[in-house]
């Protein structure tokens, strides 16, 4: 289950908000256009699919980079350690 902060990060990726807890009433929109309660509530349903898509894209980019470099993920970890 997604948290309110995760949902807002998906809906408003550039920030500009603060949340206390996970309820809509705990959101303060500081430097962004507010989302509606309906959009916020729907975000909890949409978050898992969005996150899976983000993770898949990240994995693809990582695999392509390792392929171009001609190294494995373990070898890359050694380089970065």
Image: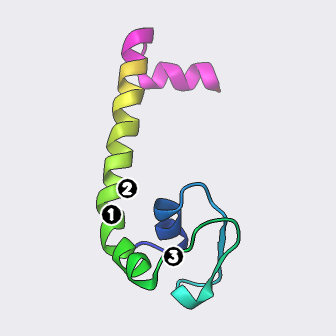
Q: Which mark is residue 10?
A: none
**Residue underneath mark 1:** 48
Q: Gap in Å between the C-alphas at discs 3 and 1?
A: 13 Å
Residue 79 covered by magenta stretch: yes
Residue positioned 38% across, 47% down in the render: 54
Residue 2 against residue 59 in the figure, above or below: below
Residue 34 against residue 51 in the figure, above or below: below
Structural crowding at the residue carrying mark 2, measured as other residues with C-alpha within 10 Å and reported as few (<14), some (14–19) or many (≥20): some
Q: Secondary structure at mark 3?
A: helix
Residue 7's spot in the image, x, y percent? 46, 69
Q: Quadrant of residue 45?
A: bottom left
Residue positioned 63% across, 60% down in the render: 15
Q: Secondary structure at mark 1?
A: helix
Residue 70's spot in the image, x, y percent? 40, 9
Q: Secondary structure at mark 2?
A: helix
Q: Nearer the viewer, residue 48 or 11?
A: 11
Structural crowding at the residue carrying mark 3, measured as other residues with C-alpha within 10 Å and reported as few (<14), some (14–19) or many (≥20): many
Q: Gap in Å between the C-alphas at discs 2 and 3?
A: 14 Å
**Residue underneath mark 2:** 51
Does the CB distance between marks 2 and 3 fall below 8 Å?
Answer: no
Residue positioned 54% across, 26% down in the render: 77
Does the CB distance between marks 2 and 1 fall below 8 Å?
Answer: yes
Split into 4 quadrants, where in the image is the C terminus?
A: top right
Farthest residue toward the bottom? 25
Q: Nearer the viewer, residue 60 or 9?
A: 9
Residue 16 covered by magenta stretch: no
Structural crowding at the residue carrying mark 1, measured as other residues with C-alpha within 10 Å and reported as few (<14), some (14–19) or many (≥20): some
Residue positioned 52% across, 86% down in the render: 24
**Residue underneath mark 3:** 4
The residue segment tinted magenta is 66-80
């Amino acid at each position: 289950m997604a948290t309110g902060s995760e949902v807002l990060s998906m809906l408003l990726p550039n920030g500009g908000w603060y949340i206390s807890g996970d309820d809509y009433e705990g959101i303060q929109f500081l430097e962004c256009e507010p989302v509606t309660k309906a959009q916020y509530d729907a975000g909890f349903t949409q978050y898992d699919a969005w996150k899976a898509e983000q993770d898949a894209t990240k994995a693809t980019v990582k695999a392509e980079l390792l392929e171009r470099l001609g190294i494995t993920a373990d070898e890359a970890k050694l380089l970065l350690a």
